[in-house]
Image: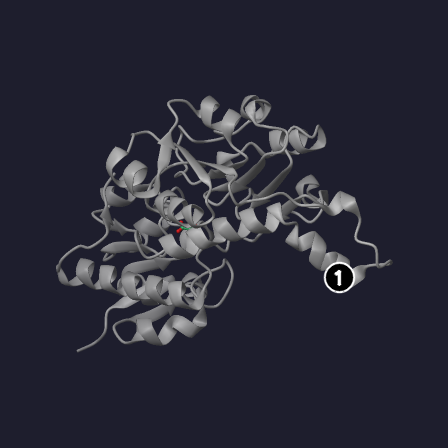
Amino acid sequence: MEKPCILANTLGAPRGIYKCFEPCIEKHFTIIQYERFVQRKEDFANKIQAVFLWGPRGIIVDQNLLESLPNLKAVVNGGVGVDHLDIPLINSFGVKVYNNPGVVDNATADIGMSLMLASARRIVEGHNFSKFHESDYYPESSLGTDVSRATLGIIGMGRIGYKIAKRAQGFEMKILYYNRNRRPESEERAVGATYCASLKELLQRSDFVMVVVNLSPETHKLIGAKEFAMMKPNSTLINICRGLVVDQDALVDALQKKMIRAAALDVTYPEPLPRDHPLLSFPNVIVLPHVGTHTVETSQMMVERMVTNALAAITGGQLPDEIKA
Ligand SMILES: O=CC(=O)O
């Protein structure tokens, strides 16, 4: 039997699924590369039953694309965040949307911890000193700050927030959290986290503030000038969710005015930042190119889950991770 066709991009631009994962997809599907599709839409349009995309950096699923794929059944997203997808629009074409909850939690929590530790202990500056130093003297101005026993404020206590709290427990951190809903059972009792009734309370009390929320109209620029003014001067902001949750101009201003100690970002807007962006000029800012899930093992799990979801949509099987508007 002929394998169903999916539209994907394993060739690079805009960034897509890596080529090394093609064999896993090709066991079940024929991949139509996005670049070939764009050149010869009439040959492929009727065949494509699913679009595979890799978070906000993949193929753009808009009205135009949806209108050109009459037999599309599913849009399958590699990551968990779906702020780049217009779900009501996609559903209005009778197309289902899937994301990947669960699979990404550990790797994303690990990147949050990595950023917190790297910023606190000034790992990037130390590395640069070792590589480029002009003297043997490592100055006292390079002293870091302790993570152990410090206070961590987690904004957004979903699956990833919870995994971060579990890791932070190992560092004997005092854990605060702010969330739409209080979670006494799983979070407070399981990881000893303390609920803050207001964002202000969390910001005022935390040494490290980690943002782990979905991007939505409510969380757009959630951390801005007002919030930086509430943070401790020795505090660190860590953003591992979406760039637009933090007002970057306000962050630059807060760093210039030394309203906070440092920032560590896996996500920015745009991604990547232009090389002359002011955030890249601070020694106390670490910027990663959105690599929260960027490990061999997690990427493999993501691709496998995408295949499961797409097969379910096409064959009418169990629908593991469908999201509805
Ligand atoms: O950005 C990563 C994700 O949405 O999982």
Q: Is residue 324 visible?
A: yes
Q: Is residue 34 above or below residue 233?
A: below
Q: Secondary structure at mark 1?
A: helix
Q: Which of the pair 46/17 is nearer the observer?
A: 17
**What's the residue at 53%, 41% (across, down)?**
238
Q: Is residue 91 left or right of residue 192?
A: left
234 on left or right of 100: right
Q: Is residue 68 above or below residue 262?
A: below
Write the residue at 37% across / 32% down. 194
Q: Quadrant of residue 260?
A: top right
Q: How many marks?
A: 1
Q: Going by the picture, which residue comes out furthest to the left?
A: 317
- Vertical side of 88 occupied by 181: above or below: above
Give amino acid for label 1. Ser
Residue at 75% over, 61% down:
130
Residue 9: where, in percent of width, then height? 42, 64
Instruction: Residue under label 1, please give it.
Output: 130
Residue 284 x, y percent position in the rendering:
68, 43
Residue 273 appears anywhere in the view: no
Q: Alpha-carbon neighbours of circle 1 within 10 Å: few (<14), some, or many (≥20)?
A: few
Residue 236, quarter of picture = top right
